[in-house]
Image: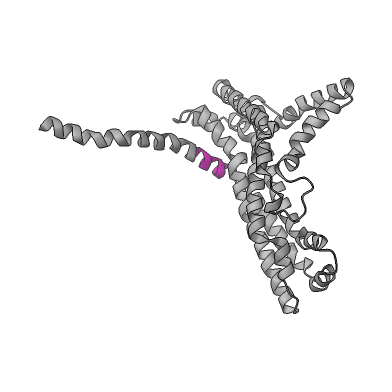
Amino acid sequence: MSLGSSAMSDLPLDVSAPKAVVATARRPFYWSVRRELWENRSIYIAPLAVAGVILLGFPFSLIGFPGRFQHTQTLPLAKQAAEHAELYEFAAAMIMLTSLIVAVFYCLGALQAERRDRSILFWKSLPVSDLTTVLSKAAIPLAVLPAVAFVPVVAVRLVMLLVSTAVLAAYGVDPAPLWSAVEPLSSTLALIYASVAMALWYAPIYGWLLLVSAWARRMAFLWALGPPFVLALFDAIAFHGFLFRHLLGYRLVGVEEVAFVPHSHSPLGLADLDPLRFLATPGLWFGLVFAAGFLAAAVWLRRRRAPD
């Protein structure tokens, strides 16, 4: 009886063991991401600051707005929608562009800074692997920054829409065409898709920048631009700039061509999204393979490089 009861008491421990192992494995990654947010406050301060500037300047754009709005109603429907949503698209673009700039400079300093200030000696003394550390840093531009930028974009657009509606209503102007043009729900879902698509498309760029950060002792920005510049120079001499210009341009702005319906109109809505075409694009998967290779090399370098 004692053997049987002992076996039964051991069974729940055996069943829950895999879950405990998974939870234990996730904890270092979670706290590593929290560390990045704590050490790099520009990740969330910069998008919020741009959102604040937009909201401060927005009231000035409402001077004479009811008259301009009524004049726009005389235009064709497609032109009306584009005119009404132009400021909203601009606000979203500025916040997302800010997050992209923050991502670039974050990646360039992510692995170099800890070697330069020798804090890497402390972090390596903790039970956190180099793989977990590099993946947590890669998660910032790939997942955290798009999510951080998404919140102020939605909030700013909603505030702008509500204030504009109140102004139009105060002058006795019907705001329904404005809501129809901005399409809050449709544009929000489209923004989520655009954020995910851009993060995946730019993954090899982020991976390259993290690799340079793991390798360069000084001037990571110049080292990041150096090899592309040499390739561009060689291409300009050998192929008149055809190959590199197309490859670089495809990676920088090609996401608009492959992730959205060609010649999509403004404002961006669900009808303009083309996820099947995006997922079937070879450039997406080749880029992800290169990104994985760059991150693997960054892990290898972090494991072997001494502090600067």
Seen at 57% across and 22% down, the residue is 300
Q: Is residue 105 visible?
A: no
Magenta span contains residue 39: yes
For the residue pair 131 and 275, the one nearer the viewer reads as 275
- The percent coordinates of residue 38 (x first, y second) are 54, 44
For the residue pair 66 and 77, the one nearer the viewer reads as 77
Seen at 79% across and 59% down, the residue is 82
Residue segment shown in magenta: 32-40
The N terminus: image quadrant: top left
The C terminus: image quadrant: top right
Q: Quadrant of residue 184?
A: bottom right
Count of numbered circles in the view? 0
Seen at 51% across and 38% down, the residue is 32
Q: Horizontally, is 28 left or right of 95 in the view? A: left
Q: Is residue 241 visible?
A: yes
Q: Horizontally, is 77 left or right of 298 in the view? A: right
- The percent coordinates of residue 47 (x first, y second) are 66, 51
